[in-house]
Image (cartoon, rainbow, N blue to C red):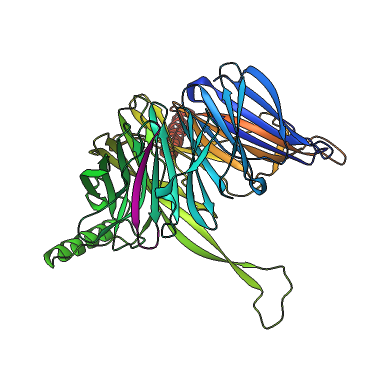
Amino acid sequence: MPVTQKRISEDFMVTSLKQKGVLFLAIREKWNDKQMSWELIRMDTTMRQVWKKGEKFDKFFSPIHAYYDQYKFVYFLMTREEKKQFKIVKLNIKNGTTEVFDGTLPLKVELKKVRVAGNYAFFTGTFNSDIAALRFNMLDGTTKIVPATYSKTYNSLDVYSHPTINSGFYLMRNTRNCNTQVHTISNIVGLQPGKTVELPRRYTLHSAHVYPLSATKSLLLGTYSIKCQPYPQGLATMLIKSGRQSRLRLHKFLDFRNFLNFYSEKKIKRIRRRALKKEAQGKEYTLRSKMLLGNIVEFENKDNLLVIAERYWYHNRVVSSSIRRPSALPRVITQGQFQFTSASISAINHNGKRLWDNTIKIKPSITTLNLKPQIRVGFKGDSVILAYMRQYRESSVPVLWSKLIHKNKTIKKETEDEVVNPNPDDRIYSATNQHFIHWYGDVFLLWGKQVVFDRKAAGIGIRKEVAFINKLRYNHKKLTKKDLKKLKKQKRKKKGKTKSESSLNKRE
């Protein structure tokens, strides 16, 4: 879809509706119009248009976040911070009808995220650099602050919900001293007693997510470290019932089946030797690698959960600066990069028990400027597809790398597929804002903006900016590099045999 140039701004958003299709939203603003226009298009799994609808809203409201309840509705949050106003647009994906709820904030809170359960919306945001949580009643239009979550000692806040559970779950964390609290607010009973997460001995919770199980029960999944160090040592699972924790389980990364398989044999022996030596001294061996906890993924049967922790390293890169400076100051600046090298996948049931685990090597490694999860999870039967996108340069073609595993076994190693444009004459000039998400089953989506130019066109102005959506399906018949090498060897052998046979025939 070409991006128009005669308007002030134009933005796009794509929401996965799983097997019900995909929702495409284009937001356009004209310089002489007081309203912004929304173009909503729902497409099915074959990328055919189901319905198309246009809406108009006040241009002073900026869209912040979108939430799909996995069943019937998509909710869009728009805010006007200086007036302490917000809107929630409720979209019915079946026919495209919308319902708008207007609300007023009691404080000048900067909203960041929304979750919906029943007729209530749960917000997270910040007020004067402190975390704040709010609940909005869509029936009477009242907005109230959740008192237990407004704190100056905690600096991180997240909200979770489930469409079948009429409650909201807040997770508060202090990243400085690794304290964690879980609060549940029911739409019927109200605020329930909060729980401060406690781990045995010198362990602390490094990062975590909450998975709602019922109105009074949730499952806490995260990574733990020793004395609040930035190096996770394993996974922690805990059940929280009515403000009480139970069934705490700690799963060490060193006990994972193939966590150390990507090291050399000498290094594995050295790590094992040091771990045994520490145990004999009554101490514990500490892993010295950082890991990023990804989002919780539900299996397609929704009986078990997948938890992914991605190992990364931080590198400083020196970049020459083009800014003129005094001669006494250096003309270089440092720019940090995050390099992801491997990922550990664990299957957890609703009781917090680990069913199986697997560790894969991200080959080739991914380098990014932003610390975000890179692995996307798909499913093919009982097997799990691990996919990630890699782009070597801004003007290069994106490459999809994928791997197929079944529990702790690797069925198929890394395969790569170039994401080619539908028009073969269009060449990518720049692609900066791209998003890679899982759609359904073994299908993924790559969407964003690109600047392309036609190689066969002549004249000025051949470059054009386009918004694109690429449907990517996992190809289980794709050959790996080892398979290609074997085929080349077989072809060489066949050529050698034919040459020798032809030479013998000539001599005869």
The image position of residue 130, as x and y in percent, is 49, 56
The front one of 90 and 327 is 90
Q: Quadrant of residue 296?
A: top left
Rendered-image quadrant of the C terminus: top left
The front one of 290 and 429 is 290
Pick out the residue farthest to the right.
Answer: 459
The residue that appears at 66% across and 28% down in the rendered structure is 422
In the figure, is residue 216 to the left or right of 272?
right
The front one of 357 and 18 is 18
Q: Is residue 438 above or below residue 292?
A: above
The image position of residue 217, as x and y in percent, is 29, 36
In the figure, is residue 256 to the left or right of 463?
left
**Residue 3 in view in this figure:** no
The image position of residue 75, as x and y in percent, is 55, 30
Magenta stretch, residue numbers: 175-187
The residue that appears at 18% across and 62% down in the rendered structure is 273
Q: Is residue 294 above or below residue 469?
A: below
Task: Please tell me whether residue 177 belongs to the stretch shown in magenta.
Answer: yes
